[in-house]
Image: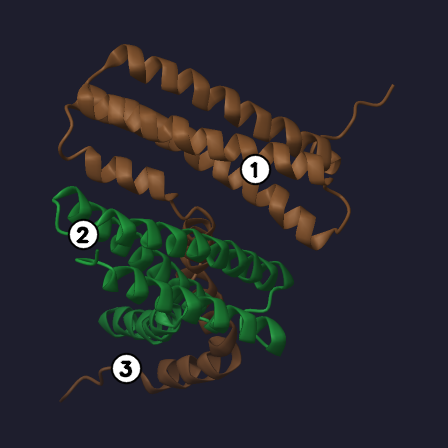
Chain colours: A brown, B green
Amino acid sequence: MSVPIIDPNTLMLVVKLLFQWGPDIIAGLTKLFSAGDGDELDADIAAILGMKAPEELEAEVAAGWLPPEWASRLQWLAILKGGTDIVMGIIEGQAVLLPGSVSDEQMAEARGATAEAEMAYARGKAACEDRDFAAYSTALVELGMQAAIVIKVKGAVCPFLHPQEEN
Amino acid sequence: MRAKARTVVAIVLLCVLPGCFSGCQQTPLAAAAARGREAVERCQDAYRTVYDDQRQGNTGTEALDKAKVLYRAAMGEAIALGMALSRARTQGDDNLNDAPLAQAIAQHTANLQVAASTILALKGGK
């Protein structure tokens, strides 16, 4: 006498329960298994917004042919230059979105500092390639000063990003 | 006992398998973000390639300068794309039902893809 694989009464109960609770269970498990999708989506958006500046990519390539310490110094220059460009982009974006919020003088000051930063970066990069520490240090300080000017202008034209302390 | 054990296994399989397959499906928003990220990475790879080639003396400085200008324009597209995707995410618009937003996302992604090809085409130029 053969033994049934599943007791008919149990089978009926399973079918009944599946019809009753199946959709909810599947929906719950779908959420559980797709819980990582939101994280992945956020990571994709962060990667798009964090697109590397040309200088950062140049430093990455240079890391392949420079000694590690010089590659790190070049990377630092690249981060400063890339950051300066991003802040400049915010100022230009604000000028387009809110006409009149950035004066001609402020725009000229920010653009001038960005151009100076570009030149300081080029000098610093050449110094890294020549392994000239003195020239590198000078270029780094100059780049930092120009970055500070651009940040100062951004602070003046985007006050909502720098909330004032309440007295 | 064995029958009950099999029943439990059957229930678990019936419940878990559809869940697994559903989890593998991407929402239109997630798919758009993945495409955008791929386009950004293609732009970055293209610029790295042109820069490296210029360092090796095969690509001229003028071509590298053009690549840099194009790349900076692509960065602007990436910021616009990222902001549009963030907006859809904030709105919970997983299916990109907001037509103008969906169109903007598609346009920025297409521009990034064109930029990547154009930058790469400068490799070996003067």
Q: CA distance from mark 1 to mark 2?
A: 29 Å
Label 1 is placed on what type of residue?
Arg
Check disc 3 and report its element: helix, strand or loop: loop
Q: Name the N-terminal-most of marks 1 and 3.
A: 3
Check disc 1 and report its element: helix, strand or loop: helix
Q: CA distance from mark 1 to mark 3?
A: 78 Å
> What label sits on residue A144 in the rendered view?
none
Q: Where is residue B3 shown, x and y percent of the image?
A: 26, 75
Label 3 is placed on what type of residue?
Ile
Measured along the vertical axis of the image, is residue B19 above or below residue A74? below
Give the residue pinned by disc 1.
Answer: A111
How packed mark 1 is, by other alpha carbons closer than 10 Å (few <14, some 14-19, many 20 or more), is: some
Measured along the vertical axis of the image, is residue A15 above or below residue B45? below
Chain to which the residue tagged by mark 1 belongs:
A
Label 2 close to label 3 by CB (< 8 Å): no
Q: Where is residue B110 shown, x and y percent of the image?
A: 42, 71
Residue A101 relative to residue B19: left or right? right
Chain to which the residue tagged by mark 2 belongs:
B
Give the residue pinned by disc 3.
Answer: A6
Measured along the vertical axis of the image, is residue A120 above or below residue A132? below
Give the residue pinned by disc 2.
Answer: B59
How packed mark 2 is, by other alpha carbons closer than 10 Å (few <14, some 14-19, many 20 or more), is: some
Residue A130 relative to residue B109: left or right? left
Check disc 2 and report its element: helix, strand or loop: loop
Quadrant assignment for the N terminus of chain A: bottom left
Q: Nearer the viewer, residue A120 or A159?
A: A120
Residue drawn at 45 percent across, 80 percent down = A18
Q: Is residue A27 visible?
A: no
Measured along the vertical axis of the image, is residue B100 above or below residue A51? below
Residue A3 relative to residue A30: left or right? left
Q: Where is residue A36 shown, x and y percent of the image?
A: 41, 56
